[in-house]
Amino acid sequence: MRPALTALKSSSSNRWLARQAQDPFVRSRATGQQGTGAGTQLRARSGFKLSELARKYPLLHGRAVVDLGAAPGGWSQVAAKAIRRQSRRGHGGIPGAVVAVDLLPMEELEGVQVVEGDFFDHSVQEQVRMGLKGFNKDGSADTVLSDMMAAMSGVRVRDVQSSLDLVQAATTFAHVVLRPKKDSYPGGSLVLKFFMHPDLNEFRKTELEPFFTKVATDKPKASRSESSEAYWVCLGYKGRNPETGEPLPSPAPVADVSDEAKAASE
Ligand SMILES: C[S@@+](CC[C@H](N)C(=O)[O-])C[C@H]1O[C@@H](n2cnc3c(N)ncnc32)[C@H](O)[C@@H]1O
């Protein structure tokens, strides 16, 4: 005899409750426990993923951050906190900000400007650019984060395509707003959530690696092991030639004065 639907539902919610009760990240989020790098109550468990990535890679060292797929706001909280810390330390005291986008409404957060809408919509992308211009004349960003995830259909091919569409849209936008490497500026960063699949490996090779000094694939501890999500962390944006679409050549290394002096004395 097949089990009744209500019995199946209650056993799966019991499993969910048991998993939540044992999840150290859920417990830390509820208590605002220190030692997570966040040091504050996070709106979403996913905030721990960004804290972990930001401890490992220099991602949040600028003052303008775009957070795509931001609701309910865990990543925005972590990014806004990093920016506040930075503006106390430097940036000539100029405050920075996070521009956050989501299809869903998001409650206000200090230092975060929220744009509600579909990121595929051109007018939504324009609002993000206007938001950046509000505190940064050229409308550029130091970091673009994308934790966007479409609702899963359960059909693998369709879900992989949705993930590819989202990473593609976030990358195209990153080319428009990220500050390229110049002089002592190391170049902006891009973080993309993706679903592990060979088609997505190809995207990394052709669309990310040529444009960044370093591209790493990471699965933070806070990302559930049963989930096939992972993140690309792209550092040191090189810029892109708007006519050819090719990466801009890296600036020539500055000549080391001691080398020149050595050559002259030989
Ligand atoms: C995993 S949640 C993000 C959690 C968030 N980073 C946090 O820390 O609170 C993924 C989000 O992506 C959003 N999303 C998916 N597709 C989107 C789209 N086309 N435009 C904007 N947001 C989108 C969803 O609405 C959802 O809130």
Image (cartoon, helix red, strand yellow):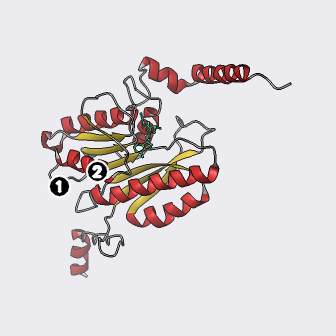
Residue type, numbered disc 2: Ser
User: Which one is in front, 238 or 71?
Assistant: 71
* The quarter of the picture showing ligand 1: top left
Residue type, numbered disc 1: Asp
Quadrant of image for the N terminus: top right
Q: Is mark 2 on a helix, strand or loop?
A: helix
Residue 39 horizontal/vertical position (percent): 37, 25
| 138 shown above or below 101 | below
Q: Residue 138 carries which label?
A: 1
State left or right for residue 258 relative to residue 165.
left
- Identify which residue is drawn at 39% across, 53% down: 170
Q: Residue 123 carries which label?
A: 2
Looking at this view, name the residue that lies furthest to the right.
1
Residue 198 horizontal/vertical position (percent): 60, 59
Residue 70: quadrant of the picture: top left
Using the rendered image of the protein, determine whether residue 141 is visible from the camera's viewpoint.
Answer: yes
Residue 90 horizontal/vertical position (percent): 18, 41
Using the rendered image of the protein, determine whether residue 142 is visible from the camera's viewpoint.
Answer: no
